[in-house]
Image: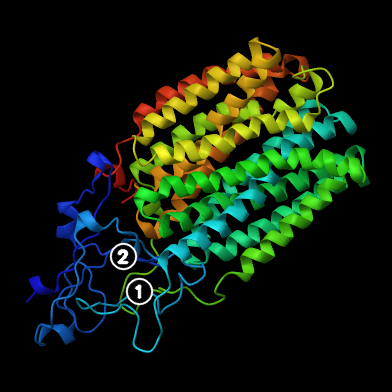
Amino acid sequence: MTRDSEVAAEPLTGRAGGGERFSREEARAGDDRTSEFGPRSRMDRGTRSGRPCFRGEVSRADAHAPIPAPTTSVPAERERTPEHARPSAVGAPELSDPNVAGAVGTTVPAGANRAPPGSGPAPDPSRIRRRLLVLTSIGHFVNDGTVFFVPVVATLLASGRAASPLEITAMLVVYYAASSLLGLYVGHWADRSGRPLELMALGLAILGLGMGGFYVALVLVSGAAGFAAAIIAALVVGFGSSFYHPLGASLLQAGFDRRQLGTALGINGAIGSVGRALYPTLFFLIGLLITDNSAVLAFAALGVAASAVVASSGPGRRPANPPSAGTRGAPAARQAFTLGIVTLAAVAFVRSAATFGVVAFLPTYLQLVRPLWPGAPLGVEVTILYLGGILGQPFFGALASRIDIRLLLSVTSLGSALSTLGFLVVGGAPAVAFLFLTGFFTFSAFPLLMSLSAEYVDPRSTSLANSLVFGLGSGGGMAIGPLIVGLIIANEYAHLPLGFAAMIVLGVAAAVAVLVIPRSGTQRSRMPLFG
């Protein structure tokens, strides 16, 4: 009787041979892995009460009841089937509908319809995924367009408000530190609330508010008051930027199977790169049509408008899968600290420090030290860098489902370092090509890191795990890289090539550090470091 009421464990996934791995230890433990995103491949057998059983529990209703007809069991090798294997993305339209297949405690008899009688046909999973990709791509466009415009704002403060290198460095460090540290709170908040889409909308609104603060610093005040306004705006924008990447990634991780995840993240990341590429150019075009710096207000309004669009697409109700009485509640935060997540975050930190030490100061370098060509508009020069990411993210995202992601991380880290070196030592058309390649390799981090992080953590803790990797890891590197370069240049912009050279060395080190990341899909990689 006990054997008939055991709950099969969630399969652990990996990329060895393109197949799925199943942990026998997890099967013996009976860990059901039911999450607020929805159950992952529930394979209940012999249950009648509808209550989830954990670690071999037997409900009283089941203990003395005849065994009902067998229910559908999804073999481990078929978990990748999109319509059945992926959990619901809580907070997205339709995906959080309690009538959609996959609600907690729902056991589907073999051959039965997943939707209850009279509820109408089940939503088309492909349509739901497309809508989810559209909403997250809107968020990515505005988020990356806004946050990667911050180095351009730094250049405007340096050239228009005569801000010193130390003041610019302080502003950049405040911005990147806020994005990194506050992201941990945002990720934990999202995992506990089960509302990543609504929180993503909140982050976009905060970004719009921060851009309004930069307008104040650029136009309305100057001197010490202008510097204070810039620091406050950097803090607000940094907080707003901590929302999108972990939450957008967790929504896509929940909505797409592993064969499609890398491609979806790559497309989503490419839309973010479009935002990065367009914002600097739009700034100068709007300035020509209206007034200087007026585009900053337009970007603030765009952030608020995007927030309204995303928020209006949410279900506006509680999560579809709250913990049932007598079951385990929200996972402890320490469950996100697995060996794979911690090592991946450490490598992301080194890689990000190397790349963003260059990216943060590159607009200032192009404006004040060496333009690509005489009289080149700054917006066009920066756009060339970001255009590389538009092609690079979907390219490396598509490869993520076919090639070991650790190898791709190493190749892109090395490619970014060597492309930066080429940009520094040549001029003319070759310099333009190397600037494009720098963006091509540098901005591949999002689809690669987020595809890999999904393999290292329980689905209930994905937002916090993503915050550890992309927030504390990449975001922390974003804060440290500009700080290192700022200390090297010693209050003199002419020393920027020396600071960039140090970042090139660090980029090569990041390519080698990838060797410490454990192979995904192994029990060791998912081992919690704190119990």
Vertical relation: 352 (above or below) 418: below
Q: Residues within 10 Å of mark 2 (few under 14, many from 20)?
A: some
| Residue type for callout 2 | His
Vertical relation: 358 (above or below) 462: above
Q: Residue furthest top?
A: 425
Residue 430, image x, y percentages: 64, 15
Vertical relation: 446 (above or below) 436: below
> Could you tell me if the residues under marks 2 and 1 are in contact, i.e. CB atoms within 8 Å?
yes
Vertical relation: 116 (above or below) 260: below
Compare residues 232 and 14 and report the one nearer the observer: 14
Compare residues 280 and 457 and report the one nearer the observer: 280
**Which residue occupies 78% across, 26% down?**
165
Report whether residue 174 is seen: no
Left/right of residue 309 with respect to residue 71 in the rendered view:
right
Residue 437, image x, y percentages: 57, 25
Residue position for label 2 = 84
- Work out which quarter of the rendered image holds the N terminus and state it: bottom left
Disc 2 secondary structure class: helix
Report whether residue 25 is seen: yes
Left/right of residue 183 with respect to residue 62 in the rendered view:
right
Q: Residues within 10 Å of mark 1 (few under 14, many from 20)?
A: many
Residue position for label 1 = 101
**Which residue occupies 37% across, 29% down?**
407
